[in-house]
Image: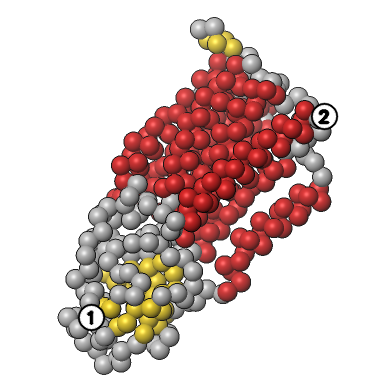
Amino acid sequence: MRPVASSLVGTTEVQRASARRIRIPPFCIRIGDKIDLSRTEQQSKPPSKLLLEHCSFSSYSYLSNAQDWELTMQPAPGVDVSIRQAHPMDPWIKHAPTIITVGMIVILALHGRIAQPAHYHDFADQSVASGIPHAADVLSNVGFALVAIWGWLTLRPRRASAQLRGGWPGYRLFLIGLLLTAFGSAFYHLAPDNFSLIWDRLPIAVVCAGLLAGVRGDIHGGSQNKIDVIVLAFCAIASVAWWVITDRNGAGDLRPYLLLQGLALILIPLWQAIYRSPRADRIAFASAMGLYILAKVAELLDHEIAAAFGFVTGHTLKHLIATAATAAVVWGLTRRFSRAPVANPPCPLAG
């Protein structure tokens, strides 16, 4: 089933009014299907035409113009389909992500260049282990690789499932970027300078692009997903390239790189709220966003945390917290398969 996310698109003809609660298999209603509900307990309500208000990989809402009811189905085995009062989406809400994106671009353009701090490479971790300099900052990147491998082995075999098909091109980019982050960040921390920093920032930008493309794919679906992945991957590379070029000209500018990270933090929860992603997904991604913000705070307090605790520095802690953030994303994606089967069974009610 191809996910659809626009408001009031597609129709489903109801041939006979049904009881308030019926049981119907998961993943079985498609746009344009004719549903015969005559096998359920009948009510005196007249037939009506239901317009599809919102549809994603795991929740389907149908708005009835005639009776102003909303039919909500959550695709879990033997789930009850309930009818409740509708709350149609305000048209302007769908445009909020675009408005925010344009607004952030304008604000950053007016702000002027954002330079890298002068002492950026001066990290608190000076430990050495088995000849590895800055050992804690280097070795703490192993977690990124482990999460990437876990996600790949768990999600790739299910990439064609209804729960993952729409967002998989983006999540694949996310996992590849995450694996490259483990190597790129470790390489950078062996000998921190602006050249090695390129290979740290580039995969991080790819991770952000992959998450944006993945969540957008969950919402919109269709062949457009692959185009979104290509465009966002190009933007990720361009954001780092812009910093490299401007830095070599003596005026390094981090605005595009920071914009990409900021958009991921803002647009992902906003998209999921607007298009009513499942609660478990929203919790997982919100946890990841919160942990990433905490990781950035730890990064800024690198020396202060090292002085306070002694056994760990802020940047090492940043790596560990960021690893937990990426694990929350992968956990949220794997949770989809504990809520619903991978298969897309035929619907016995479809005519």
Q: Amino acid at mark 2?
A: Gly
Q: Position of residue 330 (x, y in %)?
A: 41, 42
> Label 2, on which residue?
250
Query: As displayed, is residue 267 above or below residue 4?
Result: above
The numbered disc on residue 37 is: 1
Mark 2 Cα-neighbour bin, 10 Å: few <14, some 14–19, many ≥20: few
* Residue 148 shows in this picture: yes
**Which of label 1 and label 2 is nearer to you?**
2
The quadrant holding residue 153 is top left
Q: Quadrant of the C terminus?
A: bottom left
Q: Position of residue 30 (x, y in %)?
A: 32, 69
Q: Secondary structure at mark 2?
A: loop
Earlier sequence position, callout 1 versus callout 2: 1
Query: As displayed, is residue 170 above or below residue 96?
Result: above
Give the side of residue 204 with respect to residue 102, left or right: left
Q: Amino acid at mark 1?
A: Leu
Q: Quadrant of the N terminus?
A: bottom left
Q: Report the Cα–Cα distance between label 1 and label 2.
A: 70 Å
Q: Residue at x 68, y 35 (%)?
A: 241
The quadrant holding residue 346 is bottom left
Q: Secondary structure at mark 1?
A: loop
Q: Residue at x 46, y 65 (%)?
A: 5
Q: Nearer the viewer, residue 141 or 166?
A: 166
Query: As displayed, is residue 169 above or below residue 99?
Result: above
Give the side of residue 324 with respect to residue 112, left or right: left
